[in-house]
Image (cartoon, rainbow, N blue to C red):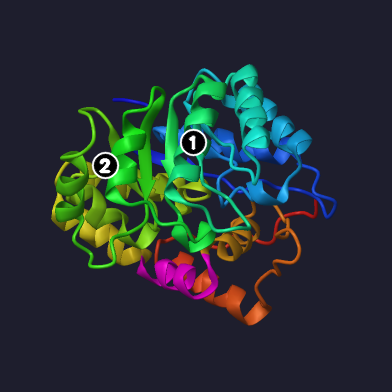
Amino acid sequence: MTLFNGLSAFSITPTDAAGRVDTAILARLLKRILRAGANSIGLLGSTGCYAFLSRDERRRAVEAAMESVGGRIPVIVGVGALRTDEAEALARDAKAAGADGLLLAPMSYTPLTEEEVFQHMSAVAEAGGLPLCIYNNPGTTRFIFSDSLIARLAKVAGIAAIKMPLPADGDFRAELARLRAVTPAGFSIGYSGDWGAAQSLLSGGDAWYSVAAGLLPAEALALTRAAVAGDREEAERLDQAFQPLWSLFKEFGSFRVMYAIADIVGLCRVVPPRPILPLCPVDILRVEAALESLEIEPMGRAADT
């Protein structure tokens, strides 16, 4: 199984109000993913608030991750930044710390052209010298990768995978067939958007880049294994149990919900970086109810960090 296959669990990155990473809590969260048996860890993805952190704090997070779980589970590090030279530096930092792979979204304040994205990603792949996964996330970047751009990038040395959003028409099989026809053999095509995980894997997707798995790795892994094995009945049964949580992800954004989950299950009490606000008490009760459908009981609020 390659680096970009199976369940990739994306952790939150706990910080204080000043944006300083709590490396002890981060290590605890990552060790929990390791023990559950996920295929990889996604560090400093969107759930990991990479866009809110300084280069120094991102470096500290990667170093803490590699010290705690490095060599026992692959770690894929998000290196997105507004400037190409900044993203290149982040990629070099990740490699120096011992990361196994990179994840790169085309962040920009000014809308980017396809040629700009191609050159940006090619430069970062070369600078990092690690297998790189394209992060196709139009919900945050407002950039949509065309099939022709994906095909072109898939031929660049070092670019080995793409993390796709859910297809608008829900037809995973058609999209996978279309993309595999224009990309090299072995190029990994996986999906984010947790509510589409079961169908994406049942349809032959290579990876599930999962937000929920960052804090609920055992539950997400059970769904992954059923779907990869082609056990549709079991995968859809497990997916059904996740539905209340998926509904909250759609309503509030998974980022906010994950911070509430961390507190509810007793892992840590941290808040999202401002200007993102935590969920209100009434909505936190809804998160608790969604977890109960997964047979996860609240453990009492985590101690203040």
Q: Is residue 249 above or below residue 200?
A: below
Residue beneath disc 2: 225
Q: Which mark identifies residue 185?
A: none
Q: Is residue 172 above or below residue 283?
A: above
Residue 27 seen in render: no
Q: Nearer the viewer, residue 13 or 146?
A: 146
- The residue lying at 39 percent from left, 22 percent from top is 157
Q: Is residue 247 visible?
A: yes
Residue at coordinates 70% horizontally, 36% vertically from top-left? 58
Name the kind of residue labelled 1 in the image: Gln
Identify the magenta region: 243-253
| Residue 252 is one of the magenta-drawn residues | yes
Q: Please tell me which residue lies in front, 85 or 30.
A: 85
> In the picture, which quadrant includes the N terminus?
top left
Q: What is the x, y in percent for residue 225? A: 26, 42
**Mark-to-mark CA distance, 1 and 2:** 37 Å
Residue at 73 percent of width and 56 percent of height:
270
Tag 1 residue: 119
Spot occupied by residue 84 in the image (x, y as percentages of width and height): 62, 37
